[in-house]
Image (cartoon, rainbow, N blue to C red):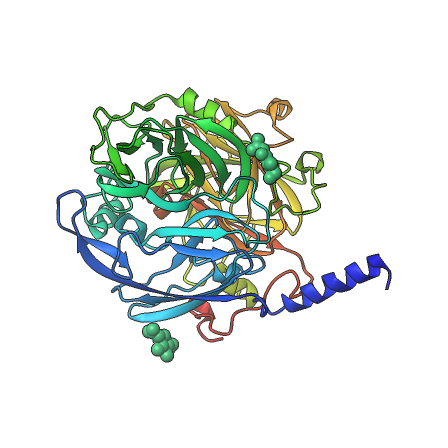
């Protein structure tokens, strides 16, 4: 065999072995996640929370690239439940995504096993409940995909890695918050910021002179946070699975649903230092704290807390533009040979997606291009698979907003062709920050701008090294543009990470499709798939 033939042969073998979905040669990791109610009091008030294996946050899930991940979610709540893997997407397997468009919810007092494979998405992610505003009550945790030792790293191995789930928290029971939303009331501003389940005093112990990695995920429901460590600089190395140009920051903004990792070298005097996560873009002064403890220190962190930005929107936008892809570091590029230049790809479809708030039948609702999403009883993915009519159609949502149109209910699904290269303009005319997440894909964040996007803005896109991530913020009265190569067949959720907005309709699905039925482009329905709605009889 010539070299080319041999390579083609190898690729064929690899393709065959992944046909069944999971890769038999790669290690298996098994997790049991038991979902229960429990009592916690992080803000001094005893309240019900959703625990995972008895904890808030749940256990951090750590795995390596290519690992087969078998997760048994045991729902001990009194309500249907689903867990989703935020940013850790499954190739060809939207069946495992854990949102109501792809999966029937796990009924109360039963369990369901997810079977996934961590691909080459080395990075920092989170998991959280996707149903019924459950995330407001907890149920979240960190999810890290590590490189296998054979894969080179663009930074020296840190002495240790810390996972920080950071996010806003309410003292109010999530069922009451949900009831009030159902009645049409506004969502209140959260009461505090937690770092790993506590508003203060979580201790990260480390040694002078060494370098540590902090993996931070904003698992909150509404507020962006600014993260900083007293007396220490943060060297950003990774954002949602992309290695970025390693720049030093005094502090970093992390918006809802986002995650990143940075390195911190302990060059300070041996004492303790404040770790701070403070709320952004709100008048309420909310701060979560933790402690960076140098081994041997007997000195508590000194007040005052390090100062960070509060309302400065321009500051945040400027910082966002400094996050750039490291083109020479290894990455989960569509073309791993490094010849991939997204800037040269022809855009095949442009979507202008405008969020809006309004009322339908006198009740508060949120919408995208005037459609406020309603979950049908039958998951979209099952409707597709069994050709069940009248569950959704591809004309409910338009590619651009319709001026003057009132909000209406609908089940929005955008039909995209497999391998389309899509430009998505997120337009935000509201006074609050929005955060958008796409399942199943990363996208290139090519531009942020103020006021209204026009085609002339295309000249300003970063077509060389913009960060490739899954979640992006859109500043108040501003726009953000992302480019996405939709190369992952399936039904994928595009959602607001501002959780009450999603609960009240701010989401939609991308149906990434071609007519060729091949297990190479999409895995078959899992044998344990739950059936519900019109699919119950299959
Ligand atoms: C999960 O459910 C199956 C039946 O569907 C049952 O056999 C199994 O024991 C359950 N496992 C746990 C841990 O609850
Ligand atoms: C980019 O990645 C390369 C290869 O891993 C690494 O050597 C380099 O330091 C990185 N550059 C920056 C600016 O982070």
Taking the view exactly as shown, the residue that stands out farthest to the front is: 296
Q: Nearer the viewer, residue 211 or 535?
A: 211
User: In the rendered picture of this protein, how many numbered marks are placed on residues?
Assistant: 0
Residue at horizontal 68 percent and vertical 64 percent from the top: 14
Relative side of 327 to 352, left or right: right
Q: Nearer the viewer, residue 137 or 143?
A: 143
Residue 388 horizontal/vertical position (percent): 53, 66
- Is any part of residue 249 visible from this angle? yes
Quarter, ligand 1: bottom left
Residue at horizontal 13 percent and vertical 50 percent from the top: 46
Relative side of 88 to 131, left or right: right
Residue 456 horizontal/vertical position (percent): 62, 22
Q: Nearer the viewer, residue 167 or 247?
A: 247
Residue 134 horizontal/vertical position (percent): 30, 53
Q: Nearer the viewer, residue 114 or 500?
A: 114
Is the N terminus in the top left, top right, bottom left or bottom right quadrant? bottom right
Residue 402 horizontal/vertical position (percent): 51, 34
Residue at horizontal 29 percent and vertical 40 percent from the top: 295
Relative side of 349 to 255, left or right: right
Q: State whether residue 231 is above or below residue 498.
A: above
Residue at horizontal 44 percent and vertical 37 percent from the top: 262
């Amino acid at each position: 065999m010539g070299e080319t033939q041999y390579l083609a042969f190898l690729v064929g073998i690899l393709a065959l072995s992944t046909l069944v979905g999971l890769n038999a040669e790669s290690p298996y990791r098994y997790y049991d996640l038991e979902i229960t109610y429990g009592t916690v009091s992080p803000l001094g008030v005893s309240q019900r929370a959703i625990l995972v294996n008895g904890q808030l946050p749940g256990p951090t899930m750590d795995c390596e690239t290519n690992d087969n991940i078998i997760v048994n979610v045991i729902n001990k709540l009194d309500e249907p439940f689903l867990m989703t893997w935020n940013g850790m997407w499954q190739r060809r397997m939207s069946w495992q995504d854990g949102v109501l468009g792809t999966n029937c919810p796990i009924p109360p007092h039963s369990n369901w096993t997810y079977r996934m494979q961590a691909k080459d998405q080395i990075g920092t992610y989170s998991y959280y409940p996707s149903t019924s505003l459950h995330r407001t009550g907890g149920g979240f945790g960190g999810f890290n995909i590590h490189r296998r030792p054979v894969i080179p790293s663009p930074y020296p191995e840190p002495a240790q890695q810390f996972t920080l789930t950071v996010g806003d928290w309410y003292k109010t029971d999530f069922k009451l918050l949900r009831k009030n939303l159902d009645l049409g009331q506004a969502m209140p501003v959260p009461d505090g910021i937690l770092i790993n389940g506590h508003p203060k005093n979580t201790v990260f112990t480390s040694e002078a002179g060494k370098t540590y990695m902090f993996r931070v995920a904003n698992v909150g429901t509404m507020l962006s946070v600014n993260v900083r460590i007293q007396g220490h600089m943060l060297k950003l190395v990774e954002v949602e699975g992309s290695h970025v140009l390693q720049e030093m920051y005094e502090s970093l903004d992390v918006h809802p649903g986002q995650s990143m990792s940075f390195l911190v070298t302990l060059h300070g005097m041996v004492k303790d230092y404040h770790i701070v996560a403070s709320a952004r873009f709100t008048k309420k002064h909310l701060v979560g704290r933790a402690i960076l403890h140098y081994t041997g220190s007997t000195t508590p962190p000194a007040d005052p807390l390090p100062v960070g930005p509060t309302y400065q929107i321009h500051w945040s936008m400027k910082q966002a533009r400094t996050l750039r892809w490291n083109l020479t570091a290894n990455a989960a590029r569509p073309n791993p040979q490094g010849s991939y230049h997204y800037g040269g790809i022809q855009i095949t479809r442009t979507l202008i997606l405008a969020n809006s708030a309004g009322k339908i039948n006198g009740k508060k609702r949120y919408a995208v291009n005037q459609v406020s999403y309603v979950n049908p009883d039958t998951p979209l993915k099952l409707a597709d698979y069994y050709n069940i009519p009248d569950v959704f159609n591809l004309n409910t949502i338009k590619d651009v907003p319709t001026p003057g149109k009132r909000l209406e209910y609908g089940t929005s699904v955008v039909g995209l062709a497999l391998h389309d290269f899509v430009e998505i303009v997120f337009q935000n005319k509201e006074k609050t920050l929005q955060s958008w997440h796409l399942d199943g894909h990363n996208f290139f964040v090519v531009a942020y701008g103020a006021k209204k996007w026009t085609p002339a803005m295309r000249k300003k896109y970063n077509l060389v090294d913009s960060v490739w991530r899954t979640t992006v913020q859109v500043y108040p009265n501003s726009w953000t543009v992302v480019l996405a190569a939709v190369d992952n067949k399936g039904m994928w959720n595009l959602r607001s990470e501002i959780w009450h907005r999603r609960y009240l309709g701010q989401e939609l699905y991308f149906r990434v499709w071609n007519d060729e039925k091949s297990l190479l482009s999409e895995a078959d329905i899992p044998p344990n798939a739950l059936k519900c709605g019109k699919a119950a009889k299959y």
